[in-house]
Amino acid sequence: MPSDARSRCREAARRFREANNKWLALGITPAEMLRRQPTPDEERILRERVRASNALNEAAMALTTDEKCLGLLRFLRLPDESMDRMSDDELDAYFDAPATEEEKREVKRMLAREGEWSDVAPSEDSETEKS
């Protein structure tokens, strides 16, 4: 992963986790938000979370297709409760670790099925596509 893309993703992910934790601490369900007018504080926290989510999505766009697939694969394999307990440094280490041989094979399988996914486009610098 290029260092500038990785650092942008890392910082965006930290900001999202912080904003999401504030949102979760409110204890409000989406259904409850639809039933009543949010307080100014709740609305501010929700807007912060949306901005952080958008920034994370934008930062992820700089990654290669391989990197996106590997990140998604690792995210899906990580239980929610583990992610909640892990520090930023532990999460960085988990997502930044070099791909194992098994992960490389799984990414290749994901990319082979890429045509079935409407929202995945190959990148020119994808390592898997070169091999």
Image (cartoon, rainbow, N blue to C red):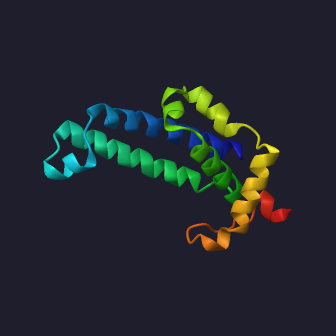
Say if residue 63 shows up in the picture: no
Res 98 quadrant in image: top right
| 61 lies above or below 17 | below
Residue 46: percent from left, percent from top: 30, 44
Identify the residue at the far left of this view. Answer: 36
**26 to the left or right of 76:** left
| 123 lies above or below 11 | below
Residue 85: percent from left, percent from top: 50, 26
Res 49 quadrant in image: top left
The residue sitting at 48% across, 31% down in the picture is: 84
Q: Nearer the viewer, residue 60 or 119?
A: 119
The residue sitting at 71% across, 47% down in the picture is: 2
Q: Nearer the viewer, residue 80 or 87?
A: 80
Say if residue 131 shows up in the picture: yes
The quarter in which the C terminus is drawn is bottom right
The residue sitting at 64% across, 49% down in the picture is: 73
Q: Nearer the viewer, residue 19 or 104?
A: 104
What is the number of callouts on the image? Answer: 0
| 89 lies above or below 107 | above
